[in-house]
Image (cartoon, rainbow, N blue to C red):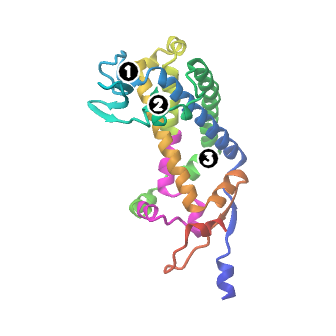
Amino acid sequence: MFGTNRDRTPTVIHRHGAFTRIWHWINAACLLVLLMSGLQIFNAHPALYWGKDSSFDSPALSILAVSDNDGEWHGITQIGAYRLDTTGVLGVSGPPDARERRAFPAWITLPGPRWLSAGRQWHFLAGWLFAPMLIAYLMYLVISGQLRRRLLPRRQEWRTFGHVVTEHLRLRFPRGEEARHYNLLQKLAYLLVLFVVMPLVVLTGLTMSPTMDAAWPWLLDIFGGRQSARTIHFLCALALVGFFLLHIALVLVSGVANNLRSMITGRYRLPPALPSNEEAHPDEQDR
């Protein structure tokens, strides 16, 4: 019995280097500011379009406040030809006795009041910190070999794709030696976010700047116009929100203390491997 307990004692490994940990937390703060200030900017013209022109007659997406025959305001979110009543959430928000007509409610925008210029300042401040740090981190991944060693899937991993998806859906996470490395789903998610979604956020953000368009006019050609770039920018922001909500949820169910410890100190306790007939509760990974 004593031998079994020793075999199942967690092994502590160094999972994240100092540069990765610092980048992670600064990046998280930047993205929060970018999201909240970006929604403030969106509220100034709450519609998205494809192409070069903008007209409320044919938006790809719009979030508006519409008054009915009784003078009551309703929040209407329109996606293409589909119209949804989003009163209380989008378009018109707040308690019934203090409704406010704005696309996104004040609590999720920075700053909260209708202050477009301040929202732009917050957005540019966070953006000009986020963009160079993203470039630096991508270069670090390539130069240090971390990209090849930790993120690029190996050929044999593709054979386990279905199994990995099933295990995640069942909230069963790698243990023992398997927990030393990212699984295939993690690798694909990080590659997509780091090398596709985040760069698109930066490039489409630059495309919306008249100054950058004058210096790099090819950006407008790549994205099909400033309005298309704005729409792609918004969709990528939504993708990042979805990624981080899922990321936080998985951190919560797979072991909060252990995951936070690894991103603060770099030290990660490998959950001990279990016999094939045993299943562990996610909280055991915190111990």
Q: Residue 19: x and y, percent?
A: 70, 43
Question: Is 18 situated left or right of 48 in this image?
Answer: right
Q: Residue 108: x and y, percent?
A: 54, 35
Q: How far apart are marks 1 and 2 (CA)?
A: 38 Å
Q: Which residue is denoted by mark 3 in the rendering?
A: 145
Which quarter of the figure is the N terminus placed in?
A: bottom right
Magenta segment includes 172: yes
- Are the residues tagged 2 and 3 within 8 Å (C-beta)? no
Q: Quadrant of residue 34?
A: top right
Q: Quadrant of residue 256?
A: bottom right
Which quarter of the figure is the C terminus placed in?
A: bottom right
Q: Which residue is denoted by mark 1 in the rendering?
A: 224
Q: In the rendered structure, which amino acid carries the disc numbered 2?
A: Arg
Q: Which residue is denoted by mark 2 in the rendering?
A: 99
Mark 1 and mark 3 lie on one chain; the one further toward the N terminus is 3
Question: Is 165 situated left or right of 30 in this image?
Answer: left
Identify the disc placed on residue 60. Answer: none
Q: Which residue is drawn at 59% across and 36% down?
A: 32
Q: Please, what is the dominant secondary structure of the magenta stretch?
A: helix
Q: Residues within 10 Å of mark 2 (few under 14, many from 20)?
A: some
Q: Residues within 10 Å of mark 3 (few under 14, many from 20)?
A: few
Q: Check disc 3 and report its element: helix, strand or loop.
A: loop
Q: How far apart are marks 2 and 3 (CA)?
A: 54 Å
Q: Point out the stretch of residues depicted in magenta.
A: 165-194
Mark 1 and mark 2 lie on one chain; the one further toward the N terminus is 2
